[in-house]
Image: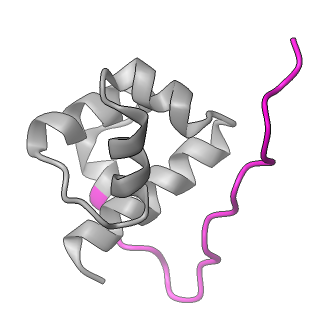
Amino acid sequence: MTGRELVAWNVRKLRTAKGVSQERLAADAGIARGYMGDIERGLRAASVDILDRLAAALGVETAALLRVPDAGEASPEALRRGRRRA
């Protein structure tokens, strides 16, 4: 896996585990939602500053965004589509 793919994998895994939407994570990290989606799909590389902001918004150390998945670890699942009702 490339560094970009590791970031994409880990951001999605952490985000979905916490039940946070891309839109909410982007807002919490102070980045555009489209940019967030591109990072999570591995289409764009995030700077160290952006990684720091994403990690802070997810409540983890920045290094957690570069964790190599265990062999055979399942791909992160997507959250249910649509908005949550209050």
Question: Can you tell which quarter of the image residue 56 is in?
Answer: top left
Instruction: Give the residue displayed 64% in from the left and 77% down from the top.
Output: 74
Verify whether residue 79 appears in magenta. yes
The answer to whether 68 is drawn above or below residue 12 in the figure is: below
Q: Image check: 85 left or right of 39?
A: right
Verify whether residue 84 appears in magenta. yes
Could you tell me if residue 11 is visible in this image?
A: yes
Q: Which portion, as a residue range, is magenta?
A: 66-86
Q: Main secondary structure of the magenta part?
A: loop
How far across and how far down the image is residue 67, in percent?
34, 63
Task: Indicate the colouring scheme.
Answer: one colour
Q: Image check: 80 left or right of 9?
A: right
How far across and how far down the image is residue 6, in percent?
33, 68
Q: Residue furthest bottom?
A: 72
- Of residues 83 and 2, which is closer to you in this image? 83
How far across and how far down the image is residue 58, in percent?
45, 32
Instruction: Give the residue displayed 53% in from the left and 31% down from the top.
Output: 23
Instruction: Give the residue displayed 25% in from the left and 50% down from the top.
Output: 63
Q: Residue furthest front?
A: 34
Q: Image check: 46 left or right of 24?
A: left
Quadrant in which the N terminus is drawn: bottom left
Question: Can you tell which quarter of the image residue 84 is in?
Answer: top right
Could you tell me if residue 67 is visible in this image?
A: no
Q: Residue furthest right?
A: 85
